[in-house]
Amino acid sequence: MVVTLKYFGQIAEVTQKEEEQIEIKETLISELLELLYSKYDGLKSKDFQIAQNHELVTNETAISGAEIALLPPFAGG
Amino acid sequence: MSRYNRHIILSEIGPEGQDKISNAKVLVIGAGGLGCPVLQYLTAAGIGTLGVIDFDVVELSNLQRQVLFGSSSIGKNKAIAAKERLKDLNSEITIIAYPEALTYQNAINLFNQYDIIVDGSDNFETRYLVNDACIITNTPLVFGAIYKFEGQVSVFNHNNGPSYRCLFPTPPQKDTVLNCSDIGVLGVLPGIIGSMQANEILKLVLGLGDVLSGELLCYNALKSKSSTLKIKRNESIIQKVLNDKDTFEDNQINLNCTNETEEISITDFQFENGIQFIDVREPHEIPKVTELNVTYIPLSELETHTNSIDPIKKKVFFCQSGIRSKKAVNFLKSQGIKNCYSMKESAADIKNYLEHYNVITKE
């Protein structure tokens, strides 16, 4: 299936883009992460949460959604 | 009440709503990029009691976004400078400035005196401290955070809603350098995010509209777009904070970017005007470095003599071996006093060097 990946903050700096579409088989979030870690150097050293269709998910969640976002915490004020 | 006429003529607010605003007590953590617009709009709106806590002083580079301050504020404590400006904006409300750092020791007592807490801090240490203290005191938290061109807004701990830990359970371990290093920010961004926080606060006080509880709003200034994501309350995470509440005050806040002390050596030291040299040895220890204008504050008395430390100037600490001077620098950093350095060499080495090289140091 095709999912749209959205990157925020420091994550978008690592991926050099704020959004992309990828083709992925029906699998778990953890496998998507492995794929992204191998694709993007430096992603593994970032802290972030993952949201699928605007809801937080864990590594064990099955990919079902159209949109998956990688959201880092911001410290600035 | 003509001051609040434009609120009162709104049927959704009216005189009753304005009374709610006048009776509200709101504490703002940090008078920085986010805190400034929050404070400004809450003061203008007539929030009855407005507290502001900040240990930091206003610097020239703050004025690009911290719109409450002017050139005359530079060098002043931010909470004090904010209060001075806000009193002119609205003298009918009570403004309380706390020119100190928020700590695990003062947070609970402080939060208990307010209805709503606003997070405008600039580091993860304080953000988790604020969140946990809000859970323990059962106080709603209006959260805002920024990064370069992006911002996040939410309301936590409201009506059994989620907390910041339900979104990000623990402080980031990986890229800790990002809390402190100056990474730059579009000046208007904290104005936008801070105004969104002020909006959430007024909705909470008035009981109007839909509060951003259980949702994180993410705003991108370059795209002028926002998206929201849902956050669910995680009962076990909140319970863990509550279980640890008796030991909460035993925690120590560490705002240092790293645990490394800024060390300098006399041999590559640039003598320039306006440096404060501080000898942290006990009075009986010799030799005294008479070649320099030295402030004498023994390490044992540093805590009670921080007012002898210039908040702005570059400060160089020395002692007999470089250990106490390091401790002094770490202590002052924990108090938010910047621009402190520890001299590697001993007082005797420094004296020797100055004599040998005939360095002209006294202004």
Image: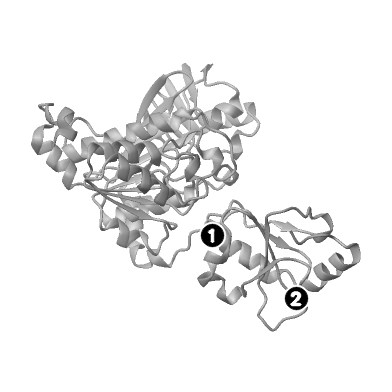
Residue B174: x and y in percent read 58, 45
Disc number placed over residue B334 in the picture, else none: 1
Check if mark 2 and mark 1 are on a common chain: yes
In the picture as drawn, the residue positioned furthest to the bottom comes out as B284
Would you say B90 lies left or right of B181 here? left
Label 1 crowd (10 A; few <14 / some 14-19 / many >=20): some
User: Please, what secondary structure does the residue beneath circle 2 have?
Assistant: loop
In the picture as drawn, the residue positioned furthest to the right comes out as B356
Alpha carbon of mark 2 to alpha carbon of mark 1: how far?
Answer: 28 Å
Q: What residue sits right under mark 2 in the picture?
A: B288
Label 2 crowd (10 A; few <14 / some 14-19 / many >=20): some
Q: Quadrant of the N terminus of chain B?
A: top left
User: Callout 2: residue from which chain?
Assistant: B
Amino acid type for the residue under numbered disc 2: Lys
Residue B75: x and y in percent read 52, 49
Amino acid type for the residue under numbered disc 1: Ser
Q: Can residue B279 be seen in this snapshot?
A: yes
- Front residue of B139 and B320: B320
Would you say B123 lies left or right of B164 here? right
Q: Quadrant of the C terminus of chain B?
A: bottom right
Q: Residue at x 57, y 42 (%)?
A: B178
